[in-house]
């Protein structure tokens, strides 16, 4: 039976048929404002608080303190787990990407992390123009994560208006095992949010679009409901 890692996010595990298959690399993709960082921090924090699984958050863009400040509104406080050696933020300059592989591997070993977030591959692509080289770097990250038995979220930004694309560079979905896409579209009256599991290697999952909300609890997915969007 396929072992799964529960995200602990309301409704998300249900549409994933029980959670993320253990050891997979999951692409989490969406435009600005879709809640990608919120989902990532919930995934790590729920691991720490609900499932006794340690974590690493590697950021190529935002400073750790800024992330902490933003997610404090959801009741997320990483400091006790940092002090206990169960969680670590890594802020790294994408200009020196080759050095980060060793730093990430050492941090995972030191923390005994089972959950990892890479935020985001979009920052890597700004400095690595060649798609083949970018794909190689993402692949190298996946090799480290698989070798150490981690289940990871890899964030990618979708450029607004790029109809039909589910990642920024078009290579991320081919290196990862699973793909989760977040939509934020405007109809006549308001903006609507929807989430879809595009693929999940070796596992069944919901094929529908589901609405989700960002509340005081963070992201909550309405797994029993179906969303209807004008465009993807």
Image (cartoon, rainbow, N blue to C red):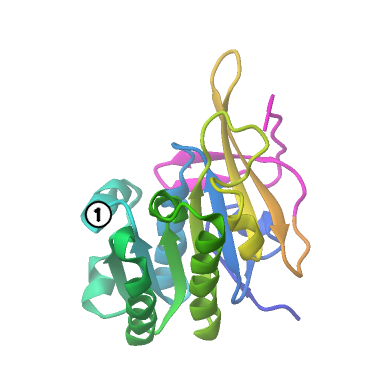
Start and end of the magenta stretch?
206-232
Question: Which of 27 and 139 lies nearest the eye of the viewer?
Answer: 139
- Binning the other alpha carbons within 10 Å of mark 1 as few (below 14), some (14 to 19) or many (20 upward) gives few
Does residue 128 appear to the left or right of 206 in the view shown?
left
The residue that appears at 47% across and 62% down in the rendered structure is 43
The residue that appears at 45% across and 37% down in the rendered structure is 32
In this rendering, the answer to whether 205 lies above or below 98 is above
In this rendering, the answer to whether 157 lies above or below 39 is above
The total number of labels drawn is: 1
Where is residue 75? Give x, y as percent: 32, 53
Q: Quadrant of the C terminus?
A: top right
Q: Dominant secondary structure of the magenta stretch?
A: loop
Report if residue 159 is visible in the image: yes
**Helix, strand or loop at mark 1:** loop
Q: Residue furthest top?
A: 188
Where is residue 52? Give x, y as percent: 43, 78
């Amino acid at each position: 039976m396929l072992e799964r890692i529960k995200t602990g996010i309301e409704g998300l595990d249900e549409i994933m048929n029980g959670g993320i298959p253990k050891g997979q690399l999951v692409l989490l993709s969406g435009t600005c404002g879709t809640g990608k960082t919120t989902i990532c921090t919930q995934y790590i924090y729920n691991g720490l608080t609900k499932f006794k699984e340690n974590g690493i958050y590697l950021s190529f863009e935002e400073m750790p303190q800024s992330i902490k400040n933003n997610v404090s509104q959801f009741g997320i406080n990483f400091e006790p787990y940092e002090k206990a050696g169960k969680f670590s933020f890594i802020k790294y300059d994408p200009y020196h990407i080759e050095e980060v592989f060793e730093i990430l591997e050492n941090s995972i070993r030191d923390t005994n992390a089972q959950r990892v977030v890479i935020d985001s591959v979009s920052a890597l692509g700004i400095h690595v123009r060649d798609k083949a080289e970018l794909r190689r770097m993402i692949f190298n990250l996946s090799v480290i994560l698989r070798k150490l038995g981690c289940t990871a979220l890899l964030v990618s930004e979708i450029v607004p208006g790029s109809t039909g694309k589910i990642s920024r560079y078009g290579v991320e979905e081919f290196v990862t095992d699973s793909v989760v896409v977040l939509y934020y579209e405007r109809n006549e009256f308001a903006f609507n949010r929807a989430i879809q599991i595009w693929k999940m290697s070796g596992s069944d999952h919901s094929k529908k679009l589901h609405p989700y909300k960002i509340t005081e609890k963070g992201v909550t997915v309405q797994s029993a409901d179906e969303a209807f969007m004008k465009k993807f």
